[in-house]
Amino acid sequence: MAYFATLFVELVLSILLLKFLDANKTWTVNLIISQIFKANAITFFYVPIYLLLVSSQIHMDNCLIILKYTHVEDWWKEKIKILLKDTLIYLLSIYTIPLIVTVMLSSKYLKALSYKEFIFILEFLFIVLLLLVVYGTAYLIVLAIIKRAITAYIVGILVPFIDFVFIYIFKTVNFSGITLGMLINFLMSYSLSLKKHLFLFGIYLSYFLLLFTFLNIVMTNTLKKIDIYRGDKKSEN
């Protein structure tokens, strides 16, 4: 149901986009992407649905599953592997297919995709993949520590919402944020040359990879100090 609901929303956005294209035939790839994946849609729909799908990992928190692993770090690594696989499937089915269809339907306005436009689409999808992985990792960390699914879900939703509030409510245009704001700024860099754009993509890629690595290092160290089945700190005795 989550997948169908997301696809329905994207279908509506694509139809509205094509109507806009009929009125304005000068649209570019970055404008198409920004219309399909609006910040408010990502914040209030895509991320909440994505975290619901990630919550299906709850079976991995069963004590019988945890006891199968010699080291608790191996259990966490397995959770991350499942997260990466689920996120990739979600990205390909929910984001990639509607984007390809919309771009193909819009080809009469865009003509043939240039090399730069094709590279830009791949870069954008890869950043979205890392963005979702960061949200999913934050959710899994909170869930593993406090054992409160609702609280973990709220924390996961609040991460993109913080950027949304600063950028769209407080109008801090120059504030790139920590997650969603970075994605928005990347869309705004479309006009740069291909060389500069690839360099900027390298910076964004490094940032999200470092953020993902930092979260996992913090969690690995935390696992050594808590009873993972209960979530409390281990006795010092």
Image (spheres, rainbow, N blue to C red):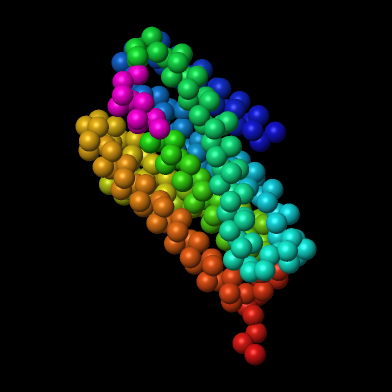
- Quarter of the image where one finds residue 71: bottom right
User: Magenta part of the protein: which range?
Assistant: 113-122
Q: Position of residue 174 (x, y in %)?
A: 27, 47
Q: Position of residue 186 (x, y in %)?
A: 33, 39
- Quarter of the image where one finds residue 141: bottom right
The C terminus appears in which quarter of the rendering?
Answer: bottom right
- Seen from the viewer's position, the closer of residues 172 and 218 is 218
Q: Residue furthest right?
A: 64
Q: Position of residue 70 (x, y in %)?
A: 67, 68
**Residue 13 in sight:** no
Position of 201 with respect to 87 (left or right) is: left
Taking the magenta stretch, the answer to whether it contains residue 182 is no
Q: Position of residue 48 (x, y in %)?
A: 59, 44
Q: Residue at x 45, y 52 (%)?
A: 162
65 to 194, vertically: above or below? below
- Seen from the viewer's position, the closer of residues 114 and 144 is 114
Q: Residue at x 51, y 45 (%)?
A: 132
Taking the magenta stretch, the answer to whether it contains residue 116 is yes
The N terminus appears in which quarter of the rendering?
Answer: top right
87 to 223, vertically: above or below? above
Position of 229 with respect to 164 (left or right) is: right
Main secondary structure type of the part rendered in magenta: helix
